[in-house]
Amino acid sequence: MLAEIGDIGITPATDHPAQAYARVRELARQGAPDPLGLAVASYGQEARLSLSGSLGQCAYEDLFNASPCMDAIAPADLQRAVRLYAAQAARESVSGRESLRLMADWALAAPARALRLIDDPVSQRLLVAYGLARIGDIVDGKPDSARDPFANFEATGRLSLADAADGTPNVTPNPALQSLVAALQARDPQRIADADRVAALAYRVGRYDLAQGLADRLDTALAWWVRAKLAIRRGDNALAAQAYARAVAAFPRGDGSVEAEAGALLKGEQGVLSLSRGQYVEALDQLYRAAAAGDGAPPPEEGWPLSPYWNDAAYVAERVLTTDELKAYVDRLPAPPPAPSRPPGFSRYTTDQFYEWSRLNQPPVHDRLRQLLARRLVRENRVAEALPYFPADSD
């Protein structure tokens, strides 16, 4: 999201240092050698010039520690600093991204600060993107839980920031996000940048009217996703199913409204809705595809790779579909990919070596589903039918 807010026009300030920094960038654009990356760094250096107010020039420590120095800076200067840091971050600068993170963190810590940035489209997009991605809701009334992905793990089984929109009783909306949405709601809707992201944020904090009004204006994957959630909330599952279908159809276009890895979550939610509507085969297909999206992903450095959707797909396959329905579905799937070849000396592997090889060579979801079907067939004494679905002896 940061790259999207970076390529913007910035008119150099009239003071000499800012003009000098602008000249560095102009020389680089004209082809002058820049082995040290000074042109990119100049954006951040120029941004620091803007972080000055009635209490003097603010340093990194003032921003990190939210000292009074930062609060004394004029809104226009804060907004200019954000635009410069965004331009730096868009050029793949780690320093620029970190500076944006600190600016967003500082601004969202107090409603008055966010209000000083909200009028600028770049700053507005930064605060919304950061609020969605990096700030969770409040678990058990503990403010520190907003930054802790483990805070609600016992209740949800998910390693992620808490989300009040999930309806978990011990989670309440984050006041910082509520204040941000309230400030955005007071603006002209036509002046809201990235309205689909604002719609998602509004839905999360319970401003459903704003979420609906913004989502209805757009044809993006995220906007249709928000519409689907709003329809479910109203009890209109038929409309929700249509909205999910539109969201899934919009996703491959890569419209930038949803990150690629969120596609599996979108399919998973669609599967849950299909299950609630009694569309069991469709639910299995959607949950299966959500689980299969993780096939081939690099395994974690430690521990066993886990698919957050396989258990859901397996439940529908094992407990909801009839055996014949499951068999018909599996038979329609493409042929399974070849199993990974065994390395030399595999038969002499120790337990630890076998564990590590297995951890790095997990069977794809396709194979897991076939084995699940095989076990169901055996339990029903249909052994001859089951055999082709078990792995080959050499697998």
Image (cartoon, helix red, strand yellow):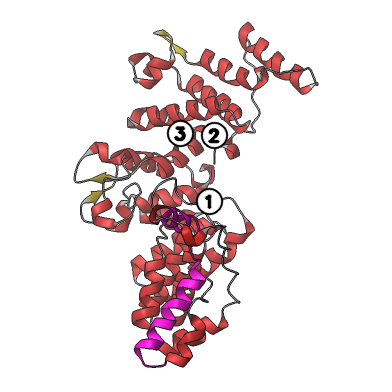
Judge by depth and name the residue closer to the eye, 387 or 342: 342
- Position of residue 107 relative to residue 351, above or below, is above
186 part of magenta stretch: no
Q: Which mark is residue 122?
A: 2
Judge by depth and name the residue closer to the eye, 371 or 281: 371
Q: Residue at x 61, y 53 (%)?
A: 255
Mark 1 or 3, closer to the camera: 1
Q: In the figure, is residue 182 to the left or right of 126?
A: left
Q: Secondary structure at mark 3?
A: loop
374 part of magenta stretch: yes
Q: Which residue is mark 1?
A: 259
Q: CA distance from mark 1 to mark 3?
A: 24 Å
What residue span does the magenta drawing correspond to?
Answer: 353-382
- Position of residue 31 relative to residue 162, above or below, is above
Q: Residue at x 60, y 70 (%)?
A: 337
- Position of residue 307 relative to residue 378, above or below, is above
**Dot 2 crowding, Cα within 10 Å, few <14, some 14–19, many 20+:** many
Position of the N terminus by quadrant:
top right
Q: Residue at x 34, y 88 (%)?
A: 379
* Residue 126, horizontal then vertical, whole percent: 49, 36
Give the dominant element type of the magenta stretch: helix, strand or loop. Answer: helix
Q: Amino acid at mark 2?
A: Val
Mark sitting earlier along the chain (1/3)? 3
Q: Amino acid at mark 1?
A: Glu
How many numbered markers are drawn?
3
